Image: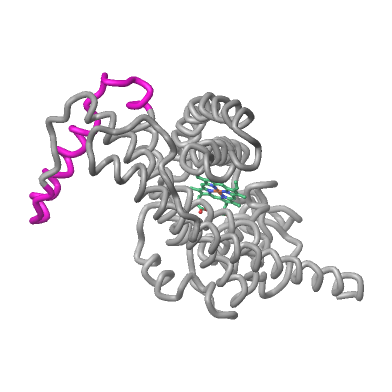
């Protein structure tokens, strides 16, 4: 490595450390923020009202702050997970155009949903003092408009990623080994074999799919007020499942239309916040956390040494297939 490169990467690391420290402070501040009721229409059910107006914003802030703090601590202790053998300069095709387009539709619409959703929960405390009442009212009305539109993009993205990725997200015994080794991420030099998706990615896929479906269905229920019996059906299903596993959750199944709405609004918020926490972790891992990971979703190509380190089984098979099909080239097609 020449002097200029060495200096550049030292600066990069210093910036990243400063960023991690800021994230740490931000996370703690978010957690410590006292969340108060946002002046939304009051809910009739007292327990649901307490969840929406007090517990959800309070523990949501602690939860999201906690995720940011954990990631910052992980970064400060472990640093960026580097490609241990360095760049090979030879790439493997990881995702085609369709997969990347579907992913970015899902990702961008989710970011819009998250920001506009967070405005409902925390905007009064965070944004209003910064921009003033009039601007905040304007922003909030645009945010509400955008939230509904982005919801349709998100549902589209969700449907599209299922098609190519479901088969890679099915469980296998390799996942247990991967998890036992902490994905090879905790200790330098440790490797955890994986096919195209490792156990961590599979967990993310199912959380996004199931959580995404739940947040979408409750969202649609809120868009067609008093016309769905979604929550009664879900609760009946959970009760039936509870009997099978020897539990009796006893959730209410004959909800009135307004009770339906109240449960939908509360569950929409809980699941939405949970997904935001999960996605923050995902974005960290795919940008700052793992060297060489982002390009999988940018160009669709990943470095061979990156692939061997994080997805050795998949990489070896891709290389074998490519070798048997064609003479070596700079880029090997999937
Ligand atoms: C906005 C910033 C985001 C970035 C930079 C990003 C980046 C990436 C990258 C690089 C991959 C490919 C990983 C691989 O090589 O296997 C990926 C996969 C994936 N992304 Fe994202 N993503 C973002 C947001 C999201 C959001 C918001 C969601 C869902 C709501 C999402 C869901 C997924 C899923 C399910 C996968 C496949 C499983 C996995 O690789 O973890 N992504 N993302």
261 relative position to 188: left or right? left
What color scheme is it? one colour
**Could you say which quadrant of the image residue 230 lies in?**
top left
Identify which residue is drawn at 61% across, 60% down: 319
Magenta highlight range: 220-249
Q: Residue furthest right?
A: 3
- Quadrant containing the N terminus is bottom right
Where is residue 88? Give x, y as percent.
73, 66
Query: Is residue 333 in view from this perspective?
Result: yes
Q: Nearer the viewer, residue 279 or 31?
A: 31
Residue 263 on the magenta segment: no
Q: Could you tell me residue 324's position as x and y percent?
A: 61, 57
Percent across and percent down for residue 227 are 26, 19
**Residue ID at (36%, 38%):** 268
**Residue at position x 56%, y 72% from top?**
73
Q: Residue at x 50, y 56 (%)?
A: 33
Q: Is residue 307 visible?
A: no
Q: Which residue is more in the foreground, 54 or 227?
A: 54
- Judge from the rendering whether residue 236 lies leftward or rightward of residue 334; answer left or right: left
State the predominant SS element of the stretch in magenta. helix
Q: Is residue 18 above or below residue 146?
A: below
Depth order, front residue of 33/178: 33
Magenta segment: does it hold 228? yes
Q: Judge left or right: residue 106 versus residue 180.
A: right
Is 96 on the left-hand or right-hand side of 159?
right
Tally the marks: 0
Say if 104 sits above or below 222 in the image. Answer: below
């Amino acid at each position: 490595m020449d002097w200029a490169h060495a200096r550049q990467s030292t600066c990069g690391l210093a910036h990243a450390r400063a960023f991690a420290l800021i994230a740490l402070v931000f996370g703690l501040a978010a957690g410590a923020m006292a969340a108060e009721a946002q002046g939304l229409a009051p809910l009739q059910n007292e327990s649901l009202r307490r969840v929406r107006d007090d517990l959800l914003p309070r523990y949501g802030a602690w939860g999201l702050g906690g995720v940011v703090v954990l990631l910052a601590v992980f970064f400060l202790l472990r640093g960026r997970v580097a490609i241990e053998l360095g760049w090979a300069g030879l790439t493997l095709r990881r995702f085609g155009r369709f997969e990347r387009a579907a992913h970015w539709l899902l990702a961008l619409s989710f970011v819009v949903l998250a920001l506009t959703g967070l405005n409902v929960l925390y905007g009064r405390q965070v944004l209003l003092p910064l921009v003033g009442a009039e601007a905040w009212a304007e922003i909030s009305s645009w945010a509400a408009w955008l939230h509904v539109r982005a919801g349709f993009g998100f549902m589209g993205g969700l449907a599209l990623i299922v098609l190519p990725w479901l088969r890679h997200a099915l469980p296998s015994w390799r996942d247990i080994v991967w998890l036992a080794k902490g994905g090879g991420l905790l200790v330098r030099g440790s490797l955890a074999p994986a096919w195209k998706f490792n156990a961590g990615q599979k967990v993310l896929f199912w959380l996004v799919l199931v959580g995404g479906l739940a947040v979408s269905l409750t969202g649609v229920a809120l868009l067609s007020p008093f016309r769905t019996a979604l929550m009664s059906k879900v609760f009946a299903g959970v009760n039936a499942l509870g009997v099978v596993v020897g539990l009796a959750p006893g959730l209410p199944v004959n909800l009135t239309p307004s009770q339906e709405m109240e449960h939908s609004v509360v569950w929409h918020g809980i699941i939405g916040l949970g997904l935001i926490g999960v996605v923050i972790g995902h974005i960290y891992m795919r940008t700052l956390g793992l060297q060489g990971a982002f390009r999988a979703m940018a160009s669709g190509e990943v470095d061979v040494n990156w692939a061997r380190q994080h997805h050795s089984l998949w990489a070896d098979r891709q290389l074998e297939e490519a070798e048997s099909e064609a003479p070596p080239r700079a880029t090997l097609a999937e």
